[in-house]
Image (cartoon, helix red, strand yellow):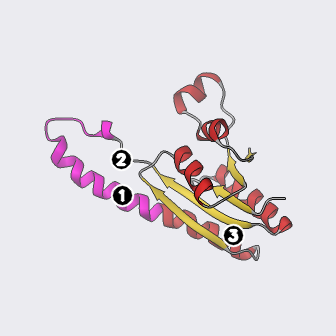
């Protein structure tokens, strides 16, 4: 069946359900696991005002440091969950990318045959305004996706 699962997480409670489901599946079928969390690029529109170039430099450094710290925290929790389930896991933090783009690229690069991720299941205007990384992955992937709600 599946030999290598890519489990995507942003560290939220909902994504934690995806992590748990992915680990249960991996353990049951003896699949390898790669966890991924993604830090998006620094929001350019936050750079308002005449002094934007100067202020943004400091804000960018702070943003990157916090993104790395949070990414490590998220992946450390995933690693602990994998260890508790008796599974080894590869941990990947992708920086400065849109989550869907990073998930798709990593799934190809790692030779994954299933992507596991959570979704809020928003529809209509909420999905349009907030976007849906899961919907984008579903639209462009060439491999199966397990969506957890």
**Contact (CB < 8 A) between labels 1 and 2?**
yes
Numbered tag placed on residue 16 in the rendering: none
- Residue sitting at 69 percent across and 70 percent down? 81
Residue 144 point in image, percent of width and height: 75, 47
- The quadrant of the image that shows the N terminus is bottom right
Residue 136 found in image quarter: top right
For residue 90, above or below residue 21: below
- The quadrant of the image that shows the C terminus is top right
| Residue that carries the numbered disc 3 in the rendered image | 81
Q: Is residue 60 left or right of residue 140?
A: left
Badge 2 marks a residue whose secondary structure is loop
Residue 14 point in image, percent of width and height: 67, 49
Q: Separation of disc 3 and disc 2 at Cα?
A: 30 Å
Front-most of residues 142 and 25 = 142
Sort mark 1 into few (<14), some (14-19) or many (20+) by Cα contacts within 10 Å.
some
| Residue that carries the numbered disc 1 in the rendered image | 64
Badge 3 marks a residue whose secondary structure is helix
**Contact (CB < 8 A) between labels 1 and 3?**
no
- Residue sitting at 70 percent across and 71 percent down? 82
Sort mark 2 into few (<14), some (14-19) or many (20+) by Cα contacts within 10 Å.
some
- Residue sitting at 57 percent across and 70 percent down? 76
Numbered tag placed on residue 42 in the rendering: 2
Front-most of residues 44 and 149 = 44
Q: Residue furthest top?
A: 125
- Residue sitting at 85 percent across and 66 percent down? 28
Q: Which residues make up the magenta segment?
A: 44-70
Q: Separation of disc 1 and disc 3 at Cα?
A: 26 Å
């Amino acid at each position: 069946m599946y030999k290598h699962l890519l489990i995507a997480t942003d560290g939220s409670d909902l994504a934690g359900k995806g992590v748990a489901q992915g680990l249960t599946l991996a353990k049951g079928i003896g699949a390898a696991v790669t966890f991924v969390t993604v830090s998006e690029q620094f929001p350019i529109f936050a750079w308002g005002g005449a002094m934007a170039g100067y202020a943004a430099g400091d804000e960018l450094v702070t943003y990157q440091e916090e993104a790395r710290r949070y990414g490590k925290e998220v992946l450390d929790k995933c690693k602990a969950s994998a260890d508790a389930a008796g599974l080894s896991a590869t941990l990947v933090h992708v920086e400065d990318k849109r989550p869907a783009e990073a998930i798709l690229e990593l799934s190809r690069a790692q030779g994954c045959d299933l992507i596991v991720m959570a979704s809020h299941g928003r529809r209509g205007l909420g999905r349009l305004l907030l976007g849906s990384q899961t919907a984008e992955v579903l639209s462009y992937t060439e491999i199966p996706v397990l969506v957890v709600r």
